[in-house]
């Protein structure tokens, strides 16, 4: 009886050892020295979201996200889940236009970036996050002048109002 149990145990051990390189949904992947190693690619990606598409003007709360912005966020979450094997870190940086005081814009940029962070977490994007604001310190516009009518200036400065999402992660190896 003991000999039969030993044989069954040995055969089971051999079977487990031989199948140790297989993976089940890439979740249980075993990396033994005799297994063929797949190349891992770490990538950095930056996504720039227009705040005017995301939020109502001068707002930052989740309730102020516009329908077009909600779709943009939903599409980004699908892309993150489909294109990354693992996300190591996400850095969210809020930017504003130059209208308003520096402290106000610093806070507004931070609130917008935090809202995006909370949304990503609520959608299951669990990783390390760093949230910061550049406020009005890093504009991308150069041709907007104070001589413009308020509404024209607001439209001209639109590219400055943005949230940059810097993603560091591992993309699946190509087969």
Image (tube, rainbow, N blue to C red):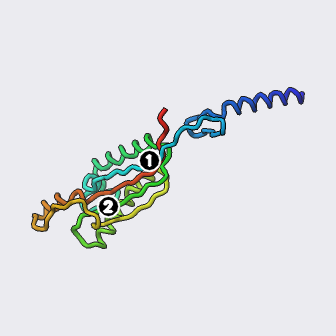
Q: Which picture quadrant has residue 63?
A: bottom left
Task: Give the percent coordinates (x, y) of residue 17.
Answer: 71, 33
| Disc 1: which residue | 43
Q: Quadrant of residue 36?
A: top right
Horizontal and vertical percent position of residue 123: 44, 48
Which of the pair 37/80 is nearer the observer?
37
Q: Residue at x 44, y 47 (%)?
A: 43
Q: Position of residue 77 (x, y in %)?
A: 40, 46
Residue corresponding to mark 2: 60
Q: Nearer the viewer, mark 1 or mark 2?
A: 1
Nearer to the camera, 121 or 136: 136
Secondary structure at numbered mark 2? loop
Q: Earlier in the sequence, mark 1 or mark 2?
A: 1
Q: Above or below — where is 153 with respect to 36?
A: below
Query: Dot 2, how many residues are within 10 Å of its Cα: few (below 14), some (14-19), or many (20+)?
Result: many
Task: Relative to 101, say whether 84 is above or below.
Answer: above
């Amino acid at each position: 009886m003991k000999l039969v149990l030993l044989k069954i145990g040995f055969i089971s051990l051999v079977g487990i050892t031989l199948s140790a390189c297989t993976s089940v949904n890439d979740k249980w992947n075993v990396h033994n020295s005799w297994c063929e190693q797949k190349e891992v690619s770490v990538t950095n990606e930056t996504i720039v979201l227009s705040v005017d598409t995301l939020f109502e003007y001068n707002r930052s709360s989740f309730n102020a996200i516009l329908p077009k912005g909600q779709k943009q966020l939903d599409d980004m979450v699908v892309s993150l889940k489909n294109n990354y094997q693992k996300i190591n870190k996400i850095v969210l940086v809020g930017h504003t236009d130059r209208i308003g005081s520096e402290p106000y814009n610093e806070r507004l940029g931070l609130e917008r970036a935090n809202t995006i962070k909370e949304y990503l977490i609520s959608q299951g994007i669990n990783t390390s996050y760093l949230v910061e604001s550049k406020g009005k310190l890093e504009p991308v516009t150069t041709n907007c002048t104070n001589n413009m009518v308020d509404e024209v200036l607001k439209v001209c400065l639109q590219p400055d109002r943005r949230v940059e999402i810097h993603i560091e992660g591992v993309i699946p190896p190509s087969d």
